[in-house]
Amino acid sequence: MPKFVTTPDGKKVVTLIPGDGIGPECVEAAQRIIDAAGVKVEWEVRHAGESVFKQGVPSGVPQETIDSIKKTRLVLKGPLGTPVGYGEKSANVTLRKLFETYANIRPVRELPGVPTPYSGRGIDLVVVRENVEDLYAGIEHMQTPGVAQCLKLISRKGCEKIVRMAFEFARSEGRKSVACATKSNIMKMTEGMLKRTFEEIAKEYPDIQSWHVIVDNCCHQLVKKPEQFDVIVTTNMNGDIMSDLTSALVGGLGFAPSANLGSDCAIFEAVHGSAPKYAGKNVINPTAVIGSAVLMLRYMGEFAAASTIEHAMLVTMAEGKVPTGDVVGYDSPKAATTTAYTDEIIKNFGKLSTTFKVRDVKPIKMPEVSTALDTVKVAKRRVIGMDLFIESAELPAAIGPDLEKLLEGTPLKLKMMSNRGTQVYPDKGTMIDCIDQHRCRMLARAADADLSDTEMLAVAQKLAVRVRWAHIEKLQEFDGQPSFTKAQGED
Ligand code: NAP
């Protein structure tokens, strides 16, 4: 159990971030419900997101918010708006990364009174999304003025943590299977690392069925036969997209809660964003944030209050007296306000949902994570070449021969050049639409070479008289296995 901060009169201190757009309305609903359930909480209100960007804080997360979370380790937050495609980084992602909340747990289940094309099929699944690595590590560069690159960074330690969390979460909820969804058929090193780690760690959980599914088929299966899934563990971007999809299966984003869990900190928030068009109208569905609060209460050990709230929510939905606009249409005379819906849940405290069960949840056994810097050791390693990424407005047929000439007398020879991952030199008679960024793959002339940095830098410097280079990637062998993939069409 994590250590919580408690006030002298026994209240647990929780950092509360109202957020942007519809955030404050949803968070207020959740806060009222927790208080009405009698849980002793001291709310420490802090801010992040759009309002903070506007104050000139480039990260969107001010120091006082960081200090509060560092102290409480427990956050209930509303969605934060992020400028799309330009400007600052997402304050949401920043918060998740600053506190190493490496697992994002996103449950969805069929709900009473919320008709969908899947009603009656008993959807009840959880997406466990890796939360801090992958393309969301946020390492992007403009390699040339016209070529952008984003690094997909996946670590062995990150995979191990998220896989263990998925199995531990499955156990805590008495779930029967964990599927691992990856694109390892294409990205054999990055997505493949999650698949390999999953298959290894699954052996430690023989009580839980485990299987791998390619992520595109997983989405197909989710739409076709969602009831076959229980827990799905996946990489960050896959999980982001898939969990919006899964929320739509049960009625939409208004119903999808989430928990960002780390070893020392937890942030609870809806899957949805700030939906600015509904901001301040008191019409949105607060269920996702209330559901996130239920997850938070269970994390705090407040199991009875969590069950009371969940039962009351299910009863409110089943009775259908105060449906939210996303269910019956915002123009419908039946559409309730956010406030009326919240009041009704509080009124229904003490009633039990008979048709829709509330899970018997046990405390999750958090994976043990060493804070030591993680190093995967290999017995043998050597550098056998380098990929030099260059910027050139010339075609490969013009650059290649010049580079070959310049490489004479050096320890490296040009094996091939590729353009966006496909071999273009030597020309194989293919039809490739080249851009101005090329990869020049050079391998050591000597079969047993272990190239030094000095040798490689000397080569890069020599080639720089002919081409402008952007970056170098070492080509290595770890225990005899290449640390790099071939280009498309490379033999
Ligand atoms: P969004 O805010 O999630 O809204 C998309 C749509 O989902 C809404 O237009 C609405 O659908 C529905 N929806 C969302 N929340 C709802 C609720 N509580 N009740 C009922 N319906 C709800 O996604 P977005 O428009 O792409 O993003 C807006 C901003 O939020 C962006 O700045 C984005 O970066 C940010 N964002 C933040 C988070 C976060 O804080 N964790 C997550 C995602 C996005 P209808 O239009 O069909 O009614």
Image (cartoon, rainbow, N blue to C red):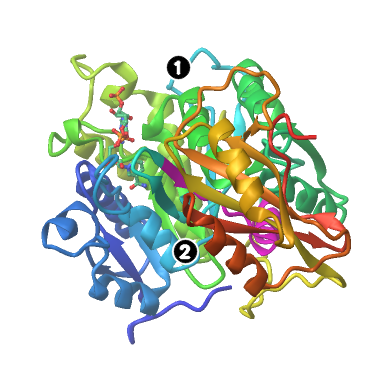
For residue 107, say whether it is visible.
no
Secondary-structure class at tag 1: loop
Q: Which residue is mark 2?
A: 266
- Quadrant location of residue 276? top left
Q: Is residue 158 magenta?
A: yes
Q: Which mark is residue 207?
A: none
Residue range in magenta is: 148-172
Viewer-closest of 331 and 264: 264
What residue type is disc 2 on? Ala
Crowd around label 1: few <14 · some 14–19 · many ≥20 (10 Å) = some
Viewer-closest of 312 and 443: 443
- Quadrant location of residue 164? bottom right
For residue 116, say whether it is visible.
yes
Q: Is residue 84 left or right of residue 291?
A: left
Viewer-closest of 120 and 407: 407
Secondary-structure class at tag 2: strand
In the figure, 102 relative to 454: above or below? above
Image position, residue 118 (x, y; %):
55, 16
Quadrant of ligand 1 in image: top left
What residue type is disc 1 on? Pro
Residue reaching furthest to the bottom: 8
Q: Which residue is mark 1?
A: 115
> Quick one: label 1 or label 2, which is nearer the N terminus?
1
- Quadrant location of residue 336? top left
Q: Is residue 406 magenta?
A: no
Image position, residue 139 (x, y; %):
45, 55
Viewer-closest of 333 and 160: 160
